[in-house]
Image (cartoon, coloured by chain):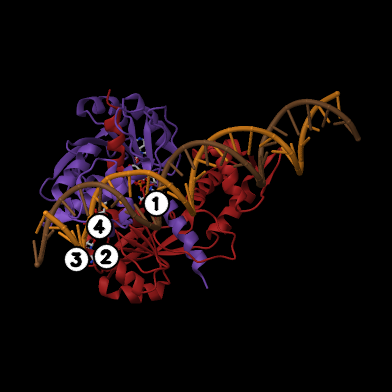
Chain colours: A red, B purple, C orange, D brown
Amino acid sequence: MPSKVSSSSKDGNSPKISEATVSRLPAYYRALSQLADAAQVRVSSEELAALTGVSSAMLRKDLSHLGSYGTRGVGYEVEFLRYQISREMGLNHDWSVVIVGVGNLGRALAHYGGFGSRGFRVVALVDADQTLIGTKVKCGAEGKTVELLVHALSDLEDVIKETNARLGVVATPADSAQVVSDRLVKAGIRSILNFAPVHLSVPEGVDVRKVDLASELQILAFHEQRKAV
Amino acid sequence: MPSKVSSSSKDGNSPKISEATVSRLPAYYRALSQLADAAQVRVSSEELAALTGVSSAMLRKDLSHLGSYGTRGVGYEVEFLRYQISREMGLNHDWSVVIVGVGNLGRALAHYGGFGSRGFRVVALVDADQTLIGTKVKCGAEGKTVELLVHALSDLEDVIKETNARLGVVATPADSAQVVSDRLVKAGIRSILNFAPVHLSVPEGVDVRKVDLASELQILAFHEQRKAV
DNA sequence: ACACATTTGTGCAAAAAAGCACAAATCCTC
DNA sequence: GAGGATTTGTGCTTTTTTGCACAAATGTGT
Ligand SMILES: NC(=O)c1ccc[n+]([C@@H]2O[C@H](COP(=O)([O-])OP(=O)(O)OC[C@H]3O[C@@H](n4cnc5c(N)ncnc54)[C@H](O)[C@@H]3O)[C@@H](O)[C@H]2O)c1
Ligand SMILES: NC(=O)c1ccc[n+]([C@@H]2O[C@H](COP(=O)([O-])OP(=O)(O)OC[C@H]3O[C@@H](n4cnc5c(N)ncnc54)[C@H](O)[C@@H]3O)[C@@H](O)[C@H]2O)c1
């Protein structure tokens, strides 16, 4: 698991879905979207499991936590199941994302076209570099390109307020990540995706997921080393 | 866990370190490097745990699987522990990485300077786009910049053989990811980092770690939705 | 040399996750 | 409409991971 959620609890009227299950729902959702695009109407747990790389038993148990949306002897309706997952995950409406740090990675994320189709919209870019502030960056792939202005770090709070961003992405160097995170939190952001290779301390109630690409390579290297004859 | 290892087993003369532990070692390694840079000599499990966001008990248990490298009543020697982890993870020598797909993301990865300091060297770039093949791309950050030629997909096997690459990065569109993966495996690559949002099927003995950024956002969105009053 | 404060390493318990196996529900065929 | 073939949903078991608590080992001060 190249990433982790810290904190966040909130007891629920909702029946509580395990973290392991939640982490797999996006893969199911994506496979279902793919099947829907291919105009497939029904899918079995076996087939969907193969597409997502999990066991069919685990898939069924995961889905059973959302509700009983399959039909025994038949399988699941692709569109219906996809809708149920998207509703459960809050993907039926768009999420606004602010990216802090418009370097190699921040720019790649902004350019990326795949977020829009998955319910995310990059609404603001923020950087500390004077030479970047005020410049425009193309956001989104062909079809839906938008040009976004790079805002000054000092405007962070205003930008978040104006755009109503709910998700924050930290793509600054490691040194600045904690400071940026603190300001995001102070501005009301409670969900942060962090690419900087440092642990972010955040108050109770704020979720951080960390994506550490070098760690991923290191984990691969560890296993690779053990494969040597 | 935004990522998973599939397959790979290999019983070991080595004492077997749990997957959960392995996934945390890179964070310990990084924190130790940071402490070493700050010229700190010793560190307690409590302090290192705080830096990496785990409990001190878990940290100690993780480290105990590598050996008994601490001193009771004192703590751990920063440099010594760092060396032990790097040795265990195979970071005492460099790993050669081939990146397939030199688009937004592939280019960002190539430009990134942080891999070199963590034991990875991007040695080859491969793409299918005729307009990209033959062009040069700057690799690594200031100080250690190298220009790499973008090779044709048809040369993949040769490039891997010549550069002795052991790790493969898939940064192509989802459509092509499985095909690319198959060719990497056929060319001898047994460790793949996949950015395309699809599950890759690989033979026994090949490890795949998947980094799915949209999934990460979706998981955040799921929790964010539940926070609403 | 001895009491005392500190901090590791680890046995054991608890919790979470994964896997198994099968009854229950549905569809299809005759 | 009865019987057989599927395929889901789930109780139960096994494995993995996390957390707790404390004995063992070290350093310190007197
Ligand atoms: N590029 C990659 O492939 C890659 C891979 C792994 C990890 N990372 C991590 O992702 C982060 C970004 O990487 P990158 O390659 O885009 O770096 P980069 O240096 O290209 O970009 C960083 C950007 O952040 C801006 N910045 C610096 N301090 C800031 C602050 N306080 N507030 C706002 N913006 C600030 C800089 O002006 C710059 O534009 C780094 O932490 C890096 O370690 C990147
Ligand atoms: N850019 C992001 O921030 C981002 C975020 C999430 C996921 N991803 C995923 O990462 C992958 C790459 O994203 P991107 O934004 O860099 O896409 P991109 O379209 O910018 O780049 C893809 C590159 O792959 C090349 N390519 C296509 N088919 C190929 C083949 N068969 N062999 C070799 N090269 C081939 C293309 O020529 C292109 O250069 C995609 O699967 C995307 O879904 C990217």
| Gap in angstroms between the C-alphas marked 4 and 1 | 17 Å
| Gap in angstroms between the C-alphas marked 2 and 1 | 21 Å
| Gap in angstroms between the C-alphas marked 3 and 2 | 23 Å
Badges 4 and 1, same chain: no
Task: Name the amino acid, label 2.
Answer: Gln
Chain letter behind tag 4: A
Chain letter behind tag 1: B
Residue contact at pointers 4 and 2, CB within 8 angstroms: no
Quadrant in the rendering for residue B129: top left
| Gap in angstroms between the C-alphas marked 4 and 2 | 17 Å
Q: Determine whether the residue tagged by mark 2 lies in a helix, strand or loop.
A: helix
| Gap in angstroms between the C-alphas marked 1 and 3 | 28 Å
Residue B104: x %, y % from top left: 31, 48
Q: Disc 3 or disc 4, which is closer to the eye?
A: 4
Task: Name the amino acid, label 4.
Answer: Gly
Circle 3 residue? A131
Q: Nearer the viewer, residue B208 or B58?
A: B58
Ligand 2 has an atom within 8 Å of the beta carbon of the residue at disc 1: yes
Q: Residue A103 carries which label?
A: 4
